[in-house]
Amino acid sequence: MQMNLQLHHVVQDVTGATGMKIIRSIVAGERDPEELARHRDVRCKASSETIRDALVGDYQNEHVFELTQALALYDFYQTQVAQCDERIEVVLRQLHANAAPVSTPLPAALRRSRQSNDFSFDVRAELYSMLGVDLTQIHGFGPYLALKLVAECGADMSRWPTVKHFTSWLCLAPGNKISRGKVLSSKTRRSSSKAAAALRLAAVTIGKTDTALGGFYRRLSARIGKAKAVTATARKIAVLFYNTLRYGMKYVDPGAEYYEERYRQRVLNNLTRRADSLGFVLQAKPT
């Protein structure tokens, strides 16, 4: 920005293919905007002319030196991340080295797109070989979240007798502060659990999807607020995680429309029952 280069305004991610090629070319000594724009990747939404105009600036030696230092640090951290991925892969293979091989093949992934923070190896396949189930079939679960929850909670869910014990351990279940039979508070307990924080982030993400869990989040959010809806949705995801690992449950999403129809039918049944208790008959509005 100090050199009046507006690359970050025309390229969505400067650490992507187009941005990194241009930055490396600048560090190497290229200053011609026309030549720099030739590094545009075919997947980049901005045109070559737009990128060329954004690269007309005032190149100062001290700022180019600072950019060179930043690029060197970026490459160093990328190397460190790659080494961490290699270490995680080795540990996962050691964990399932003595496990019985899974007879069924790995199911197809729900999401085909690759994220910028993905692992350098197929973590889905490694987790499937170790657990025997594919956690990423649950909406809101990606390979990173699945690995993080397994690291925090383990793979043996029998340590918790029921799913209620598990959600209470995560501090996602309502509290039970009761005195002389009177409920004083049912707020969830505060927790520093990394697993609970990850589940809450997944709940926020899944609230934007056209799934049954997304419909559940949106309905609760409109009724009781977003904070409580996030906790309730996170608890639902934790229940699916527990049942999948302990009982091998296969999650099949019925869709948001199915969930909304079930909710509508439940409301109608309640209204019909109340009208009947008061001596009335509930009738549909004529079309």
Image (spheres, rainbow, N blue to C red):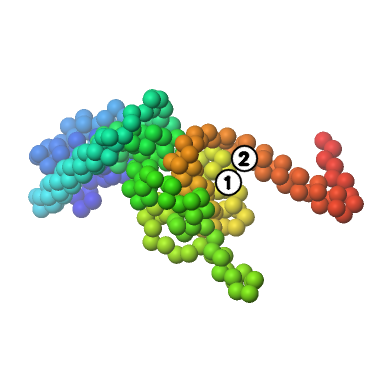
Q: Which residue is pictured at 57% across the width and 53% down the height?
A: 221
Question: Does the CB distance between marks 1 and 2 fall below 8 Å?
Answer: yes
Which residue is at 20% across, 42% downward? 87
- Find residue 214 and report its image quarter: top right
Q: Amino acid at mark 1?
A: Phe
Q: Nearer the viewer, residue 150 or 76?
A: 150
Above or below, 178 relative to 66: below
Query: In the shown orientation, is residue 281 left or right of residue 249?
Result: right
Q: Residues within 10 Å of mark 2 (few under 14, many from 20)?
A: some
Percent of width and height locating residue 90 = 21, 38
Q: Is residue 53 visible?
A: no
Residue 66 at x, y = what percent? 13, 52
- The secondary structure type at the circle numbered 2 is helix
Precedes in sequence: disc 1 or disc 2 = 1
The residue that disc 2 covers is: 259
Q: Element at badge 1?
A: helix
> What residue did someone put label 1 on?
216
Q: Please, which residue is most extreme toward the bottom here?
A: 180
In the image, 180 versus 174, the foreground residue is 180
Front residue (pair 145, 154): 154
Image coords of residue 2 (percent x, y): 20, 53
Mark 1: few, some, or many residues within 10 Å (few <14, many ≥20)?
Answer: many
Q: Amino acid at mark 2?
A: Tyr
On the question of residue 66 being in view, the answer is yes
Cα separation between marks 1 and 2: 8 Å
Looking at the picture, tell me which residue is in the foreground, 180 or 15. 180
